[in-house]
Amino acid sequence: MTLVAQLLDTKRLNRMASKDIHGIGDLRDYCLSVARTAKRAAAELTQASGAQKQHWLRRSSQLMGERSIAISEANRLDLREAPGYGLTDAQVDRLRLTPDRIASMAEGLEEVATLPDPIGEVMWSSVRPNGLEVLKVRVPLGVIFFIYESRPNVTADAAALCVKSGNAVILRGGKEAAHSNAAITEILAEAAVDAGLPAGAVQLIATADREAVGHFLNLPEYINVAIPRGGEGLIRRVSAEAKMPVIKHYAGNCHVYLDQSADPELAERLVVNSKCQRMGVCNAAESLVVHAAAAPALLPRVAAALLDRGIEIRGDRQTQEWVPQAKPATEEDYREEYLGPIISVKVVGSLDEAIEHINRCSSQHTEAIVTRDIDAAREFTARIDSAAVMVNASTRFNDGGQFGLGGEIGISTDKFHARGPCGINELTSYKYVVFGKGQIRE
């Protein structure tokens, strides 16, 4: 029985959600077997050609288009069971695979296929006075343990980026998307065989047991990096338990600052897009900061546009003076990632105060300034300590695909090893390769 057929058995899935590997001993053995398989696959991938990876990606894209109905049927099973998992509207939206989203997944695979193969790239070179040729060469990270929640389109995106960058990946999707993830992964596995890539390059964990995550996080001899993508609770658990490096961001409390010179029409358009285009994602705006000198002209207009779209406004006393519908904001509101129809608003007296407020309350993900003053823009970009800073653009653009990276496996707010959207280059490391002619050190 194939993996997707097994997971389409709802009763079996329910058994998996409790403990389906028959005890901790067997579960540990299962996790160890998956990790060992991934490490062998990673070693084989170092020999895979760029042409093989391209073939795998394009064949996966083709199969995804041909089997879109099967993917939709699997996704419908996940959506049917979603109420039993207590998913919010935003989580159900992330779970849903529409025909357009399936087509976008296939297109994303094609886009990754067109990217230059990063492995073997010479990042820097030097010929030393003694004749040694020193090369800094890009190499894979190795094995990536990727843990994510109810976004099945991420399955294809993550696998594409990992294998394109020469890494084996172990996928641990949420049980909410088990049917969809299995259908997608089966396509990726079939295409890998067609391309002559190792079967273990992409593995989906066949258990919903939460203890499995802990076992994988304690296998640093097989797994090189863990990447969690989902709610803050999941990410903090992974960060606390992992024995290997973790690439992550905890939350997306993103700000839009309306400077005193901001154009009112542009301010309204950018705030509405940043907040409302898709609310349940990490790069949606959660907080609005407005210069007091511009508040009379900007705040009523922007607030009206947000209220018309069903957004609840929580603001300080000055905000409530200009927006009577606003509710009082607490200090916690200014640090909150709502992922829904709520936004906090703060009126400030200067650019300095705006920067201080944002750096204090931000999750260091994405911040934007709307201004016609180039000096204000330069100061904002220099002093804001976040992974991405936008000038007169929506926060929603902090995305690997939008930045031209060919997709992303996640967004990092760390400063080591990667920051911002993590595409194929961020899934690599480097080593030094030195060519000599018998030189010895005196």
Image (cartoon, rainbow, N blue to C red):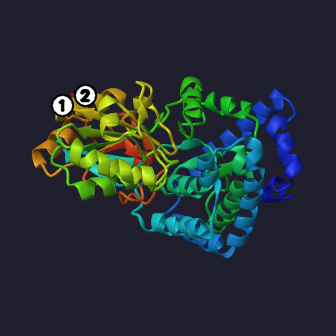
Q: Nearer the viewer, residue 286 or 146?
A: 286
Q: Residue at x 55, y 28 (%)?
A: 236
Residue 385 visible? The answer is no
- Tell whether label 2 touches label 1 (CB within 8 Å): yes
Q: Is residue 90 left or right of residue 373?
A: right
Asked whether 327 or 429 is in front, the reply is 327
Residue identifier under label 2: 356
Label 2 packing within 10 angstroms: few (<14), some (14-19), many (20+) = some
Within-10-Å neighbours for mark 1: few <14, some 14–19, many 20+: few
Q: Of the residues shown, which amino acid type is indicated by label 1?
A: Asp
* Residue 219 image position (x, y, % from top left): 63, 30
What residue is drawn where x is 61% and y is 60%?
Answer: 197
| SS at mark 1 in the image | helix
Horizontal placement of 179 versus 243: left or right? Answer: right
Residue 172: which quarter of the image? Answer: top right
Q: Is residue 254 visible?
A: yes
In the rendering, at what x and y percent does residue 68 appear?
Answer: 67, 71
Front-lying residue, 21 or 379: 379
Q: Position of residue 286 (x, y in %)?
A: 42, 41
Which image quarter: residue 14?
top right
Residue 347 vs 162, above or below: the answer is above
Question: Vertical placement of 295 versus 237: above or below?
Answer: below
Disc 2 element: helix
Residue indicated by mark 1: 352
